[in-house]
Structure formats: structure tokens, C-alpha cells
């Protein structure tokens, strides 16, 4: 997997993607992350990347020329899934992340200001992606979120790959609550079943908890999921 990120603030992307599991995977050559400064693709003395919006109003718009030049230079054969981060884009979810992880290359343009000139989006074939219904100062953190969510799914990134399969959202459910030692903390005891050593009962309890939490917290996700007979039974018997 190779991810190219085009930004006007390279360090904002490089620093978080050099730490923890992503930093390790990057260093060991498990995947490649290339960060490009959009200003390197300008052709004027002042390396201008934005301009005032046609039609007036406050804020600036990202100019089309540097973006198209950067995308053409970095992905000349159109091999990458091309994304531009935007609060107005399609909402990222685990399904999109999994689709991206199944591919070979991703190119992310970090959007800024009011947005990107529409012609750049069309010519460079950029798919607009939002990471949530809130507005950030720029698309750099959104690019980091997309890269992190995708790269952690690649075999080898996570120390314990099995854990990705148990994640929240992996199977359309939130993950169950978890406990670690000590067994009693400030008079609160770990649920008995988790220390019983009974694997099948533990599996059912965790699944029941995941189903219960998803129904409570994310009725939208719960409604989308077809429950198996087994799951209906487990949810019915689940005691929180
Ligand atoms: N840029 C500003 N806000 C954003 C968001 N929520 N997602 C992606 N890019 C953004």
C-alpha cells in the first residue's frame, strides 16, 4: 500500500504518521507514506495556493492549478483512489475504509479554506470525503484519520491482528466494554463471567453487550444490521 498526501502543512501530517504503529509500519517498509508540499507545484514566485472566491464572500478558495499539477505528477497513470478532504464530502465509515484498504494506492489532497475550486475536483477526479459532521481548520487531521484507519487494517500493522476483527464497527456493531486488572477497583468488581474462564459464555456476554450498546447508542447502526437468530436470543438474554 502506498499513500500520497498533498498538503500545505506537511509537518501536521508527517508527525502523527511517524508515531506508534503507523510509524513502525512505515519504518519497517510495511507500507509507504509520501507527503508532498502543495507549494512545490505552484509556478509563481510567491507560491500562492489560494485566491478569492468568484461571487464574493469571505474566505479563500484553493486554486485549481497547483492541485491538478500535483495530482498529475504524483499519480500520472491514475492508479490511486484520489480523495480530497472536505466537510461537505461523503461521510467516512468502516466500509469505505475497508474498501480503501483493499486497494494498492491512495492519494489524499488536504482541503483548506472555504474549499477547492470545483474544476480541480472534476479534472483530478477527486472523491470528497468528510470524517464527521463538524468543521476542522483544515483537512490535515482528516487525512491522518483516513490513513490511520486504512493502514491499521493491513496485515502486520497491528501487533495482534485478531483484534481488528473485534473492533467497534468491524461487524456493524460497537465493541463491547472491556476490563483489565485489578479485579476490584474502588469497590467495583469486574463482571464475574469475564473471570470464569468459560470461553463460550464470555463470547455470548460480549456479543450481548455489543448488541445492547449498539441499540442504545447507535440506533442508526442497529437498524441497518440483520440480526441472526443466535444474536436475537443472546440480546434477549443479555443482562447489563
Ligand atoms: N475539513 C474541514 N472539516 C472537515 C471534515 N469534517 N472532514 C474532512 N475534511 C474537513
Image (tube, rainbow, N blue to C red):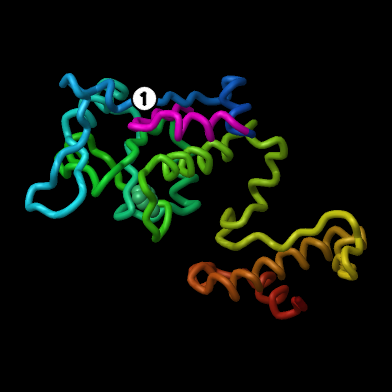
| Quarter holding residue 198 | bottom right
Residue 133 lies, with reference to residue 73, above or below; the image says below
Work out which residue is located at the far left of the displayed protein and give it: 55
Q: Position of residue 55 (x, y in %)?
A: 7, 52
Residue at 21%, 49% in the rendered image? 59
Residue marked by disc 1: 36
State which region is magenta. Answer: 1-19
Residue at x 68%, y 40% (from the top left corner) = 161
Q: Does the numbered disc 1 mark a residue whose Cβ is under 8 Å from ligand 1?
A: no
Residue 95 in the image: state x and y as whole percent.
Answer: 47, 51
How many residues crowd around disc 1 within 10 Å: few (fewer than 14), some, or many (20 or more)? some
- Residue sitting nearer the eye, 48 or 192: 48
Give the camera-side residue of 88 and 200. Answer: 88
**Residue 84: which quarter of the image?**
top left
| Residue visible at 71% across and 70% down in the picture | 208
Q: Secondary structure at mark 1?
A: strand
Q: Is residue 179 left or right of residue 102?
A: right
Could you tell whether 27 is left or right of 105 in the image?
Answer: right
In the picture, measured across the screen, residue 116 lies left or right of residue 147, that is: left
206 to the left or right of 157: right
The C terminus lies in which quarter of the figure? bottom right
Where in the figure is residue 36, as x and y percent of width and height? Answer: 36, 24
Amino acid at each position: 500500500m502506498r499513500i500520497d498526501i498533498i498538503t500545505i502543512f506537511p509537518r501536521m501530517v508527517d508527525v502523527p504518521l511517524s508515531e506508534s504503529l503507523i510509524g513502525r509500519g512505515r519504518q519497517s517498509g510495511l507500507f509507504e507514506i509520501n507527503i508532498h508540499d502543495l507549494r512545490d507545484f505552484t509556478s509563481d514566485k510567491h507560491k500562492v495556493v489560494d485566491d478569492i472566491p468568484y461571487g464574493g464572500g469571505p474566505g479563500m478558495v484553493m486554486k485549481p492549478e497547483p492541485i491538478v499539477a500535483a495530482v498529475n505528477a504524483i499519480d500520472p497513470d491514475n492508479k490511486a483512489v484520489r480523495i480530497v478532504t472536505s466537510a461537505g464530502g461523503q461521510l467516512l465509515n468502516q466500509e469505505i475504509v475497508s474498501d480503501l484498504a483493499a486497494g494498492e494506492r491512495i492519494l489524499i489532497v488536504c482541503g483548506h479554506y472555504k474549499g477547492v475550486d470545483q474544476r480541480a475536483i472534476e479534472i483530478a477526479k477527486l472523491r470528497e470525503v468528510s470524517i464527521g459532521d463538524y468543521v476542522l481548520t483544515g483537512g490535515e487531521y482528516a487525512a491522518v484519520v483516513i490513513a490511520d484507519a486504512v493502514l491499521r487494517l493491513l496485515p502486520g500493522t497491528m501487533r495482534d491482528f485478531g483484534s481488528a476483527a473485534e473492533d467497534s464497527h468491524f461487524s456493524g456493531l460497537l465493541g463491547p466494554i472491556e476490563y483489565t486488572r485489578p479485579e476490584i477497583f474502588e469497590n467495583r468488581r469486574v463482571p464475574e463471567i469475564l473471570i470464569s474462564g468459560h470461553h463460550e459464555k464470555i463470547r455470548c456476554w460480549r456479543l450481548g453487550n455489543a448488541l445492547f450498546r449498539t441499540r442504545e447508542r447507535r440506533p442508526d447502526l442497529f437498524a441497518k444490521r440483520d440480526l441472526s437468530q443466535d444474536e436475537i436470543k443472546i440480546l434477549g438474554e443479555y443482562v447489563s
